[in-house]
Image: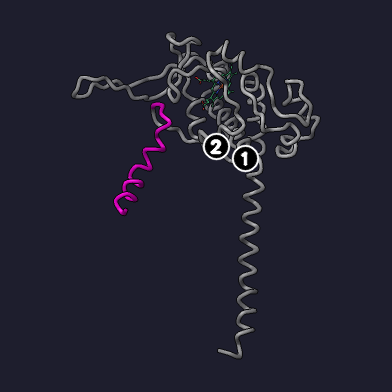
Amino acid sequence: MRKLIVMLFVCLPSLGFASGGGGPMMSANVDVTNTASLQRGAQTFVNYCLSCHSAQYMRYNRLAEDLGLTEDQVMENLNFTGHKIGEQMKIAMTGDDAQRWFGTAIPDLSVIARSRGADWLYTYLMTFYVDESRPFGVNNVRFPDVGMPHVLSELQGVTHAVFHEEVDEHGQTHSTFEEIEILSPGSQTEDEYERTVLDLVNYLVYMGEPAQVYRRSLGVKVLLFLAIFFVFAYMLKREYWRDIH
Ligand code: HEC
C-alpha cells in the first residue's frame, strides 16, 4: 500500500507536463485586481479574438459591473457583435463554418484560463513564428502545428523562432526552443507587446472566474472576523470556567 502511494506521488509531476508543447513556460504575473489592465485586455479580446472564439459564459453587463464601466461605455467600446447588453459574448461563426474554414473546432474561451493556466496562455501568445509549411504560414512553440493564425502579428511583427538542435548518442536530433526574434517590427515595441499580451491573459484569467476578486476580498474579511471572534470566544470561555478551574 505504501509503495502504491509513493508511486502515485512520483508520477504526479509528470501528469502536469502531459499537456505537451515544447520550450520553457514563460511566466505571466497576472493581477485580476488591476482594473485598468482588465479593461485593456477586454479591448484586445473583443478586437482580436471575439470573431472566431466566443465567450459564452460571460455577459456584457457583467463586464460593465466588474470592470468599472458604464453600460454605455461597454456598448460603445466592447460590443461590436450587435448583441444586447444582457446577452453573452457570442459570435456569428457556427461550428460547421469553423470546421470548413479552419479544419477544426474553435474552442470557447470563457474558461480557457482554468484549463490551460495563465503561463501557458502567455507563452502561447508570445511564441507564434513564421513557418511556411503551415496553412496560415505560422506555427507555435507552445502548441506545435496549431490551426490558429497569428492574429496579433500586426502588433508583434514578423517573428522567427530560434531552435537549438542537438544530436544525441542514438543519432536522433532534438530541437529545443531558445527565443523569438522579431524579423520586422509590428506596430508595438517588444515591451508594449508583452504588456498587451499580459493584459489579455489577465482578462482571460478574470473571465475564467469573474467573482474571484470578490471571493478573495470576502475571504480576507471572513478570516479577520474569525480572528477577532476568537478573542471574544476565548474570553467568554475563561469567564464560564473560572469557578471550576
Ligand atoms: C481567425 C480565427 C481566430 C482568431 C481571430 C483567434 N483564434 Fe484562437 N484559435 C483559432 C483556431 C482555429 C484554434 C484551434 C487550433 C487548433 O486546435 O489547432 C484556436 C485555438 C486557440 C487556443 C488554444 C485552445 C486550446 O486549448 O486548444 C487559444 C488559447 C486561443 N485560440 C486564443 C486566442 C486568443 C487569445 C485570440 C485573440 C488574440 C484568438 N485566439 C483569436 C482561431 C482563431
Question: Which structural element holds mark 1?
Answer: loop
Q: Quadrant of residue 213?
A: top right
User: Where does residue 187 sit, x and y in percent of width and height?
Assistant: 58, 17
In what element is the residue under mark 2? helix
Q: Which residue is mark 2?
A: 114
Given residues 221 and 94, the one toward you in this image is 94
Q: Residue type at mark 1: give it.
A: Glu
Tell me if residue 25 comes above or below residue 238 in the rendering: above
Locate residue 53 relative to residue 17 in the image: left or right: right
Q: Residue furthest front?
A: 1
Q: Is residue 49 above or below residue 245?
A: above
- Stretch of the chain drawn in magenta: 1-22
Residue at 37% over, 24% down: 177
Image position of 184 (left or right of 206): left
Decide: is 134 above or below 15: above
- Ligand 1 located in image quadrant: top right
Q: Are marks 1 and 2 in contact (CB under 8 Å)?
A: yes
Residue 209 is labelled as 1
Principal secondary structure, stretch drawn in magenta? helix
Residue shown at 57%/14% (left/top)? 99
Which amino acid lies under the numbered mark 2 shown in the image of this protein? Arg
Would residue 173 be counted in the magenta stretch?
no
